[in-house]
């Protein structure tokens, strides 16, 4: 088994990958780009998918290190974090399907990331 610190690093690397992929997609769509004109589409999708997997592995690994048991009820702060990351994972599709939402998506990323960080650090619920 790996340490809490190792899972934390894995989690953060996943966050960086997802945020950079979403930022790249949103900026490309903001500049009038489409899914078909994005020459880095495969790379962006791969980084996004890899990032989501790393977020899950790191997050649940840290939970195991904190002593959470399989099947136990998740606290409120964790449910908020899961909702944030599901939302962020789904946002990859929004800028190309609705280009007018590319700017709000881009501006929403740090808000969602900050909310997830707040929940993890302060565990308010």
Image (cartoon, helix red, strand yellow):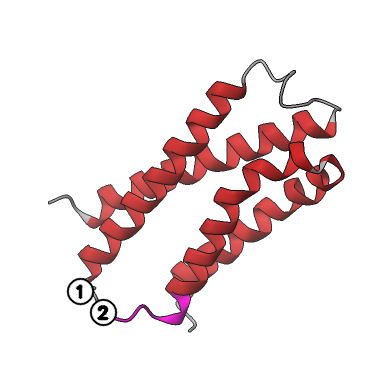
Q: Which percent across, then down, holds residue 71? A: 24, 75
Mark 2: which secondary structure? loop
The spot of residue 115 in percent (x, y) is 59, 66
Q: Residue furthest top?
A: 39
The residue to which callout 1 is attached is 69
Q: Nearer the viewer, residue 34 or 75?
A: 34
Q: Indicate left or right for 41 with 82 as reference.
A: right
As for residue 29 lying within the magenta part, the answer is: no
Residue 61: mark in rendering = none
Q: Image height check: is 75 above or below 53?
A: below
> Is 75 included in the stretch rendered in magenta?
yes
- The residue shown at (21%, 64%) is 65
Q: Residue at x 62, y 19 (%)?
A: 40
Q: Quadrant of residue 22?
A: top right
Which residue position is annotated with label 2? 72
Farthest residue, direction left: 1
Asked if labels 1 and 2 touch by Cβ distance under 8 angstroms, the answer is yes
From the viewer's side, name the closer residue of 112 and 83.
83
The magenta segment is 72-77
Q: Which SS type dominates the magenta stretch?
A: loop
Neighbours of disc 1 within 10 Å: few (<14), some (14-19), many (20+): few
Identified at 45% across, 77% down, the residue is 123
Which residue corresponds to the image point at 67% horizontal and 32% vertical from the top-left? 24
């Amino acid at each position: 088994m790996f340490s809490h610190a190792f899972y934390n690093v894995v989690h953060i690397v996943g966050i960086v990958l997802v945020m950079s992929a979403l930022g790249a997609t949103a900026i490309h769509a903001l500049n009038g780009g489409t899914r078909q004109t994005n020459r880095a589409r495969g790379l962006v999708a791969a980084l996004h998918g890899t990032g989501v997997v790393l977020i899950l592995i790191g997050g649940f690994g840290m939970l195991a290190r904190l002593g959470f048991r399989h099947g136990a009820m998740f606290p409120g702060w964790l449910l908020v974090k899961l909702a944030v990351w599901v939302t962020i994972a789904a946002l990859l599709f929004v800028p190309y399907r609705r280009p007018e939402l590319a700017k709000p998506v881009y501006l929403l990323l740090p808000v969602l990331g900050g909310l997830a960080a707040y929940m993890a650090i302060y565990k308010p619920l």
